[in-house]
Image (cartoon, rainbow, N blue to C red):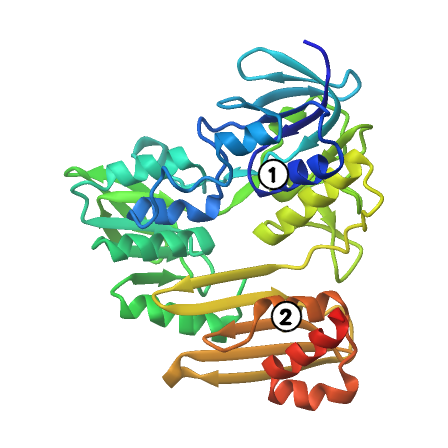
Amino acid sequence: MPAMKYLIIGSSHAGLAALDAIRLQDKDGSVTLVTRDDSLPYSPTILPYVVSGDADPEKIFLRDEKAMDRRNVTLLRGESVTTLDAKDHSVRLSSGDSLSYEKLLLATGAVPVLPHVSGLENVPHHVLRTLEDAMKLRKNLENKRRALVIGAGLIGMHAAENLAKIGVEVTIVEAMPHVLPDYFDEDGATLIQQAFSDKGIMMHMGCTVKHVSRSNGAQLVTLTSGGTISSDLILVATGVRPSMDYLSEADIETDQGILVDDRMRTSADGVWAAGDVAQAPGFFNEDKRLNGTLPDASEQGRIAGMDMVGDSALKPYKGGIGMNTCKFFGHRAFSIGLIKEENRTSDGWEVDRMTSPASQRYQKLLFQHDRLVGVLSINTDLDPGVMFEIIRRRIDLKDIKARFVDQPQETGRILMTKVWR
């Protein structure tokens, strides 16, 4: 078939943001969007709610068929890339077909990483990364009373919450000393962990699963702490890695992910990467890093699309800033930027902390040289969007820092009103 002008591999937030950016400037250039799913595009963040039944799997899609038709996009479902020939500007798909392109975006996301657990491969277990995973887990919950979640990151915690809400007895096992170790410090995580414990969820922190076996129709799990757990269902949520096995024969620079510059360009001519698969420049230093968050995936995809289409309004990527928001059992939490003192890169650090266990409120503001660099919040009135912009714009708070610490929400909104004018 003739080479298409734009080929996008991956249909979640990064791929769709790139598509929208391309179509703003080029209404007619041929676009093909390839997705490994058999469904229309969706967000992985919705999957725990599909499992619990809170989200209708028929109503979760980010784009429908009409939206694709309006954008004049060819959508190839149930296909994945097996090899990429960047010199020949072509890819081979899992069906055996080949596609040629002028410009290619790799937004292939990430895939689950399974821990090295003796016997795990011999017992039924689930992961939660695709809609198919969610539907299999939902179906397998029938007549299941007890579930074990291995991993207390965002996926594991959201899944545990939604399983508990439908009456399943949930146990969480996490290797780190506290839940959500990549997103909250010990003080904040302790409050979140207490909220889960209050709902009857058992927590085993600081240990791992040593062995799994079948026992009387259930799974018998042995922990490194010496304890044992009997479960009817196991969900493994121990992290993900960028999906880039198809690059084994491609001459593209990689590290933990696909290395890209501040326009999402890879080392290969005519190839861009964005989202969970891209290792892009960081915000706080020059090191390139993975930043698997929804806002960042959308921003990277938009920048890649603008660069692919030659949009003169493109502003290069300013660097990845971690931003994660979550709601759990009626509580609201978020973390932005450098949230742990051990992440400090030089002197000039200041930390302001407010803790109220009785009201389950926590707030932590981190400053470096009078600039906000990190925020942790649990059940406060802080606006994550405002805090993110103050960090991203590197606003000097020296003259108003005492006021900002005392009233961060009000002061932050006043600051942003002036900046946005």
Residue pointed to by mark 2: 386
Label drawn at residue 183: none
Which quadrant of the rendered structure holds the N terminus? Answer: top right
Instruction: Name the residue type under label 1.
Output: Leu
Q: Residue at x 22, y 50 (%)?
A: 146
* Marks 1,2: beta carbons within 8 A: no
From the top left corner, tell me how far across and down residue 208 is, in percent.
40, 53
Comparing 49 with 179, the one in front is 49
Q: Residue at x 14, y 39 (%)?
A: 216
Left or right, residue 162 beside residue 188: left
Comparing 163 with 26, the one in front is 26
Left or right, residue 61 beside residue 295: left
Q: Is mark 2 on a helix, strand or loop?
A: helix
From the top left corner, tell me how far across and down residue 275 is, in percent.
63, 43
From the top left corner, tell me how far across and down residue 170 is, in percent.
27, 55
Instruction: Name the residue type under label 2.
Output: Val
Counting the numbered discs, the total is 2
Residue pointed to by mark 1: 16
From the top left corner, tell me how far across and down residue 111 is, in percent.
52, 37
Q: Residue at x 39, y 33 (%)?
A: 132
Residue 282 position by quadrant: bottom right
Q: Which of marks 1 and 2 is nearer the N terminus?
A: 1
Residue 226 appears anywhere in the view? no
Q: Residue at x 35, y 47 (%)?
A: 55
Left or right, residue 346 beside residue 196: right
Residue 284 appears anywhere in the view? yes
Q: How far apart are marks 1 and 2 (CA)?
A: 25 Å
Q: Is mark 1 on a helix, strand or loop?
A: helix
Which quadrant of the rendered structure holds the C terminus? Answer: bottom right
The residue at the far right in this view is 312
